[in-house]
Image (tube, rainbow, N blue to C red):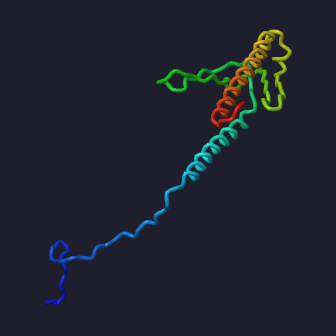
Amino acid sequence: MSDTAVADPADPAIQLPAVQAPAAPSAPPPSGAAVIQNEQGKANSLLNTIADKLDRLVTLTVVTAIADIDVVQDDPNQVGFTCRPKSGTTIEAFQTQVNLVTGDIENLISRDFATNTAYHSLTEFHLAQVTKSSDIVSTNLKAIRDLAVQISGRTG
């Protein structure tokens, strides 16, 4: 027989020492100035993110292309499709890129598109699309500018 006794923790006569969790360090609540500075930091971060995205959106591209195409439904359960040139087909195209910051304009025109008189009306259509797109972008950029001015609290 052993002379070692085992304590039963469920026995109400036995009191085990209470285990306390270490106290979490308490930080003083932030001051009003710290809260304001934090909110200004968040607003500046948002504006910086918007500015970074806008920097990437400086090129307007308009493409008018003529080719045999395959029409592919993206998802049979939804309305929508994608047009892709058929494999091995010749593509005649007119592409215009406008740098919205510098105003530089670059036109790439396939030889047949440039010389085939049958494409003359498509050339006019393409140039009209460039003008419309440029107007839309200008309107959208003005709206974004106005929104940024409102958010920053500055006057235009």
Residue 65 in picture, x, y percent from top left: 73, 20
Residue at x-position 74% and y-position 26%: 61
Q: Nearer the viewer, residue 139 or 131?
A: 139
- Quadrant occupied by the C terminus: top right
Q: Which quadrant holds residue 100?
A: top right
In what quadrant of the picture does the N terminus appear? bottom left
Residue lying at 66% horizontally and 40% vertically, measured from the top left: 47
Determine whether 11 is above or below 29 in the image.
below
Judged left or right of residue 112, residue 81 is left
Residue 20 drawn above or below residue 103: below
Q: Is residue 151 above or below residue 22?
A: above
Given residues 134 and 38, the one toward you in this image is 38
- Could you tell whether 73 is left or right of 65 in the image? left
- Quadrant of the rendered image containing residue 13: bottom left
Q: Nearer the viewer, residue 8 or 68?
A: 8
Q: Nearer the viewer, residue 127 or 137?
A: 137
Check the image and name the residue furthest to the left. 1
- Residue 22, above or below 154: below
Question: Residue 31: x and y, percent?
Answer: 54, 55
Residue at 78% x, 9% y is 121
| Residue in the picture at 21% in, 76% down | 15
Q: Residue furthest front?
A: 32
Q: Position of residue 9 (x, y in %)?
A: 20, 74
